[in-house]
Image (cartoon, grey):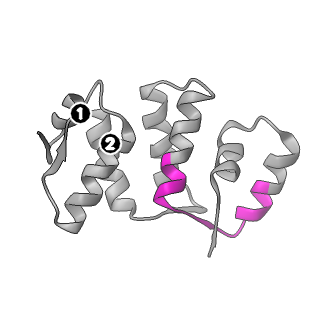
Amino acid sequence: MRAVDTNVLVRLLVRDDPDQVARAEAFVEHGAWISLPVLVETIWVLQSVYGLHRRRIGTVVGMLIDHERLTLQDEDVVRRARAAFSGTRSTGFSDCLVVEIARKAGHLPVGTFDRKLSRVDGAHCL
């Protein structure tokens, strides 16, 4: 299966350049894989460049989880991170993902100085 970079995934989501959207759609027509770093970068771009807010970010992650042609690396981890993200008002998606990756690997708690992150189950404020 092919893999996509952040810029391809962003084009598929925001659809702001018709030529690039068409090329991205053709590339993923038979399926494509999204790595966790690409997912995190994409969320960052959507928030910082396109101004998407928390609720919309949760929706986008849900769309990617359920997408028929796109496959997420460690989808189970992404699902749990999305649930944790949706259950908090201040912790970022990437922080929730860090905790869920550590959980899957059996390396909890995640030590942090971030008070917001420390409220997520599996994190511990130092």
Label 1 secondary element: loop
Q: Are marks 1 and 2 in contact (CB under 8 Å)?
A: yes
Q: Which mark is residue 95?
A: 2
Q: Residues within 10 Å of mark 2 (few under 14, many from 20)?
A: many
For image coordinates 66% across by 44% down, the residue present is: 10
For image coordinates 42% across by 27% down, the residue present is: 54
Q: Which mark is residue 114?
A: 1
Boundaries of the magenta span: 24-40
Front position among marks 1 and 2? 1
108 relative position to 29: left or right: left
Q: Is residue 34 magenta?
A: yes
**Relative image position of residue 99 (x, y in whole percent):** 25, 50
Report the amino acid beneath label 1.
Answer: Asp
Report the amino acid beneath label 2.
Answer: Asp
**Relative image position of residue 13 (x, y in whole percent):** 65, 42
Q: Nearer the viewer, residue 102 or 19?
A: 102
29 relative position to 119: left or right: right
Give residue 113's quadrant in the image: top left
Q: Nearer the viewer, residue 25 or 17?
A: 17
**Relative image position of residue 40 (x, y in whole percent):** 48, 47
For image coordinates 58% across by 37% down, the residue present is: 45
42 relative position to 2: left or right: left
**Relative image position of residue 126 (x, y in whole percent):** 11, 39
